[in-house]
Amino acid sequence: MLCRRGGFWTALLIVLLLTGCWSRRELNELGIVSGIAIDKADNQYHLSVQVVIPDQVIARTSKQETPVTMFKANAPTLFEAFRKLTETSSRKIYTAHTRVLVISEEVAREGIAKSIDILVRNPETRPDYFVLIAKNDSAESILKVLTSLEKVPGEALFNSLDTSSKVWAPTTTVTVDTLIDQLMTPGMSPVLPGISLLINESPDLQTKDMKKIDHPIKLSYTGMAVFRNDKLAGWMSKDEGKGYNYIRNKVKSTVGHMKCPDGKLISMEVIDSHSEVKSRLQAGKPIIEVHLKLNANIGEIECGINIHDPQEIERLETEGEQVVEELMRNSVEAMQHQYKVDVFGFSQTINNAYPKLWKELKPRWDEEFPKLKVDYKAELHIRNTGMIGNTIERRMKEK
């Protein structure tokens, strides 16, 4: 796996300089691409590529300029647009180290297969970059946002999504090779993360030397895009995204809350989650069973419950199980009734268990999926209640 820190770019530059094989590329001949954005208007593809400026990436002085530049081209096909970039770029566009591909909603509605086809055909391009859908904004505008924590915006997009998917259930990561597998799997449609511009309308704070602290524009991962085959069908809500990720076994860690009897809240951190999806037959028809096991810690308590009471812990576990089951149920029902697409891989579960039955269902799966019965069972175990027992507020009242 490629290094995801700033040192990666320094190492990359050294390797490119030292490599001595017959197919070597000199650094001063290449424009190293970090991110690609694809928009479309007036039957023309609008291609934007974010290219790293090597001197600025490794510069250690305070007088740095922008570490990346952007080249753009318009053409009827993406292949032409990529080649047309040479009109403005003095270097060959080199896509081997691409970190993110951002696709606009308009392109996604027409179909993303064409957009990724040219990239996967290129032997220089590695299939481990993330694919994102720009929601309510152009794909180009997403790549233009500079961040304060990472020098290269494409690298920042990759790292932030990777981190968010590990600690926050509504987000997920999809690499282009995973996307292709989902597109090629019969009966299954992909889900891709969405990203939007976040405009900060509050007054900006500044340090003594007048440097900005709170940047006016940031990027926010917003919902997940639902596809029917390779065409954008709509967007999941945050809770539907949580349910999807639980079923797909994509939740590594997250935080959620429940209401106490007095109406106040208690927060829990999921520290481990594992789902198992099986199929069984009832009266000759397939039924999907989703079994989810979770381990959690109590992270915050606003109410006055006694967490030393085993019955209270058992009650919290039961209520937590009901919450998670409802998340999964609502996500599946939204896909069954609103979009009518199987994004969960239930078709493959049936195929693996009953291949002969799947052959019968496959031609009419779009009709059968909305009628598919799904059972849910969640098991939640609270492992840790924190370093202190009852809340500080409650202990103060007991003094």
Image: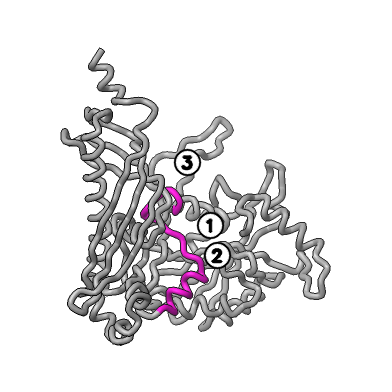
* Image side of residue 150 versus residue 219, left or right: right
Q: Nearer the viewer, residue 97 or 64?
A: 97
User: Seen in the image, is 173 located left or right of residue 5?
Assistant: left
Where's residue 184, x and y in %? 44, 79
Displayed quadrant of residue 384: top left
Do the numbered discs 2 and 1 sit on residues whose CB atoms are within 8 Å?
Answer: yes
Which amino acid type corresponds to the residue marked 2 in the rendered image?
Answer: Tyr
The stretch drawn in magenta includes residue 203: no
3 vs 2, front mark: 2
Is residue 136 in view? no
Residue at 68% in and 55% down? 9
**Mark positioned earlier in the residue sequence (2 or 1):** 2
Quick one: label 3, few (<14), some, or many (20+) residues within 10 Å? some
Q: Position of residue 127 (x, y in %)?
A: 57, 70
Q: Which residues are magenta?
A: 165-185
Q: Secondary structure at mark 3?
A: loop
Q: Gap in Å between the C-alphas at discs 2 and 1?
A: 8 Å
Q: Taking 377 as reference, is 187 left or right?
A: right
For label 2, the SS is: loop
- Quadrant for the N terminus, please: bottom right
In the image, residue 339 above or below residue 16: below
x and y, in percent, of residue 218 in the image: 46, 50
Query: Whole-percent x and y of residue 100?
Result: 53, 63
Tell me, for residue 158, which label it has, or none: 1
Give the amino acid type for the residue marked by disc 3 in the picture: Asp
Q: Which mark is residue 236?
A: none
Q: Which residue is mark 2?
A: 129
Tell me which numbered mark, 1 or 3, is placed earlier along the sequence: 1
For marks 1 and 3, give the one nearer the viewer.
1
Q: Which mark is residue 214?
A: 3
